[in-house]
Image (cartoon, coloured by chain):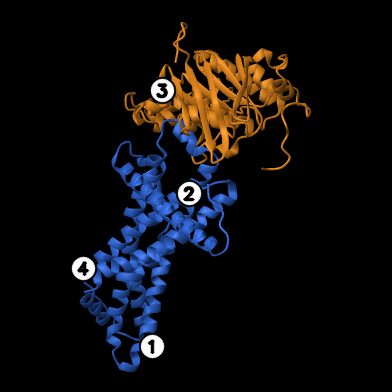
Chain colours: A blue, B orange
Amino acid sequence: MTKEFKGPLLWVSLLGRMVLNAIQEAGALALFALRGILSIFYPPFYWRIFIGSMINIGYLSLPVVALTALFSGGVIALQSYTGMAQYHVDSAIAGIVVLAVTRELGPVLAGLMVAGRVGAAMAAEIGTMQVTNQIDALRTLSTNPMKYLVAPRLLAATIALPFLVLIADILGVLGGFTVSIMKLGFSPQGYIAATFNTVKFMDITIGLVKAGAFGFLIALMGCYHGYRSKGGAQGVGASTTAAVVAASILLLVFDYLLTDIFFSK
Amino acid sequence: MTQSACKTPKIRIRNLSKSFGSNHVLRNVSMDVETGTSFVVIGGSGSGKSVLLRCILGLMTPDSGSIEIDGQNIFELSSIQRTQKLQQMGMLFQNAALFDSLSIWENVAFALLYGYRKHLPKVSRSDARVTAYRMLELVGLDPELVADLYPDELSGGMQKRVGLARAIASKPEIIFFDEPTTGLDPIMGAVIDDLIKSCVDKLGSTAIAITHDMASAQRIGDDAAMLYQGELIWKGKAKELLTTDNPYVHQFTHGLRQGPIKVETKVE
């Protein structure tokens, strides 16, 4: 199918093949995403799988996300205090913590944690089903694998992530508050007042919108890479890695794009 | 295509070809499977048996040729009609392919619980459980003992039985068997073959099995055919497998190293 080239043409042909492969991959992913989204809206919908995924993504990720948020909130308070103390603008710390957490750290850190925990698990589960013929078995039992495996996971992740991030927001602020009060000697009333004066409803809302988008991306990458697994344990391992790496990178790219759309004026 | 005087076969395959790149996996395969009979396809590894089965099931699209089920070409049906055709089929996979996140009874009743059932009545979980228990009994398992276990808690032979129970649970008109005895000891292999035979007889289904186990082929099959390098090189009765003078079949069924089939010792 492919003609072999020599000399400088070889490099051109290699580059061409790379570009073609990338375009092909992007097309396959877009089609997969489209079929996944459409499968959510056409019956049957598998509520049992959806609820299972909600518990797995939302409830079981809580400890990881909560600890991450709590400590990052604290770290921001400490770091910004180091920077601010020399300018005597300590009062800005509460504002910095709440904006950083609601706008960026909440969604991004929760997203990355969930990508590692849930995205990997989805890819491994669906990948194992693929290489052991369980997905073919679904088809022979007149069940559409996109509806049974992909649609409930996409929807569950898109809904569960904003709730997780809302909790992460609260705990992040709590982390900053605790450090500021216990270690930096701020007054609790002043800190709380500064927090509420700084944060706007839109900051939190846009953070939650980001979280929904991240949830969708994580589930999409987990399902897509799992679905395309080939060749046994090694293949499943490779697709699990690919799912986490791709979800993490896409998440940061989309974070930039969404921030650019919503916050740049 | 000339219409023969006899009744339409359950499955009619004409000039089926499939290739992956330059590798021709199926070349012009034509065969008929009559209603209520068992058809065994034998052939070595990589002879195209699995691809043939996957094409009939609609899991793979051939490059050319037609597959008719009850006289309807399945590639001309809409996706909903094809799903409805799939409802009439069951398949026992080589590794049983049980869903490891579901319990044994949910596996057996899967099509009732989760399958596409637009024109069929809805089945409650308790009714599905009753059906699953009956199917498990039919394949010689004690439902009280195994129904709430998970697939990884069963032996290979028991998993095959559960796979068989799942394949027959929706009373399919056509059942496919992919290497039903591979990985089992000879006695368990014979047990599974007998179960297959009795289930197929009880349901009156048409069966297609692919295998390279000669004893199994003779126990299950009424008719047989041999695939070699993607071509159907022999067709006949399963009883004749060991006595035919076709040199390919003779070499294959007797496991001889000398003969027209060249054993590849390296991957090309």
Q: Residues within 10 Å of mark 4 (few under 14, many from 20)?
A: few
**What residue would you read off at disc 3?**
B73
Lateral position of residue B261 relative to residue A140, left or right: right
What residue would you read off at disc 2?
A226
* CA separation in Å, label 2 and label 1: 45 Å
Q: Are marks 1 and 4 on the same chain?
A: yes
| Chain letter of the residue carrying label 3 | B
Question: Depth check: A171 or B92 in front?
Answer: B92
How far separated are the C-alphas under marks 4 and 3? 60 Å
Point out residue B245 in the picture as x, y percentages from the top left corner: 72, 15
Q: Chain of mark 4?
A: A
Q: Looking at the picture, how far across and down is residue B26, in whole percent?
A: 56, 30
Does B268 appear above or below B56? below
Q: Chain of mark 2?
A: A
Q: Nearer the viewer, mark 2 or mark 1?
A: 2
**Subunit under mark 1:** A
- Residue B69 visible here: yes
Q: Which residue is mark 1?
A: A82
In the rendered structure, which disc, 4 or 2, sits on the residue that comes first in sequence?
A: 4
Of mark 2 and mark 1, the one earlier in the sequence is 1
Q: Badge 4 is on which residue?
A: A201
Query: Tag 3: residue type?
Result: Asn
| Residue A102 location (% of width, % of height) | 30, 70
Check residue A162 in the rendering and tell me which mark sits there, or answer none. none
Mark 3 and mark 2 in contact? Answer it, CB < 8 Å: no
